[in-house]
Image (cartoon, rainbow, N blue to C red):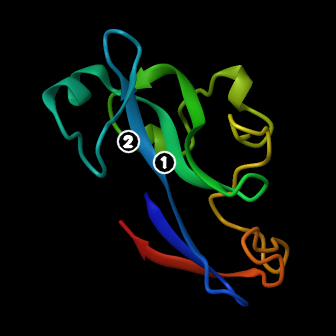
Amino acid sequence: MGTGYEWKCTACGYKIETSGPWEFYRDKRGIRKPYGHPTPISREAKRRGIYGLSASMYCPACDTLADSILVEFEAPEKGSLAIWSGCARVKQQYEHGEPTCMQCGGILYLVLPEDEITCPRCNKGIFEGGMAWIS
């Protein structure tokens, strides 16, 4: 179930938005594509199945948003029930650890920790906010 979050700096008003997790599939070439939520967006997506979950996350270390894989499954799932119930088998490399930024190696956040991240634009305020919508 995808969720959107909005975060705003308490000092300068700088705003960021994160969202996810979102289902994805891989095409014949292995390229990651949106699966659709709550149902497949194409015949190809339905035929290929759900390969994993990704999210639009924030890296405070380099002040960027990144579309990153949260988890990928050992085999594609044909329906979302196994995924959202936690029954889908996860590839070993995704069992532990936090997603990291491909640009700088910093930690990526879907949900920012409260009162912990200083705004990289003004270096004065902190980000406050939370869930803005749910699908």
Task: Locate residue 69 relative to residue 42 in the image: left or right.
Answer: right
Labelled disc at residue 22:
none
Q: For the point 40% across and 20% down, which residue is it?
A: 31
- Tell me the quarter of the image containing the C terminus: bottom left
Q: Label 1: how many residues lie within 10 Å, few (<14), some (14-19) or many (20+)?
A: few
Task: Locate residue 97 relative to residue 80 in the image: left or right.
Answer: right
In the rendered image, the vertical position of residue 38 relative to residue 88, given as above or below: below
Residue placed under numbered mark 1 in the picture:
84
Q: Most extreme residue toward the left, as rendered?
A: 43
Residue placed under numbered mark 2 in the picture:
80
- Measured as percent of width and height from the top left, residue 50 is found at 38, 31
Q: Are marks 2 and 1 in contact (CB under 8 Å)?
A: yes
- Tell me the quarter of the image containing the N terminus: bottom left
Q: For the point 62% across and 58% down, which residue is it?
A: 110
**Figure quadrant of residue 105:** top right
In the rendered image, the vertical position of residue 19 relative to residue 105, given as above or below: below
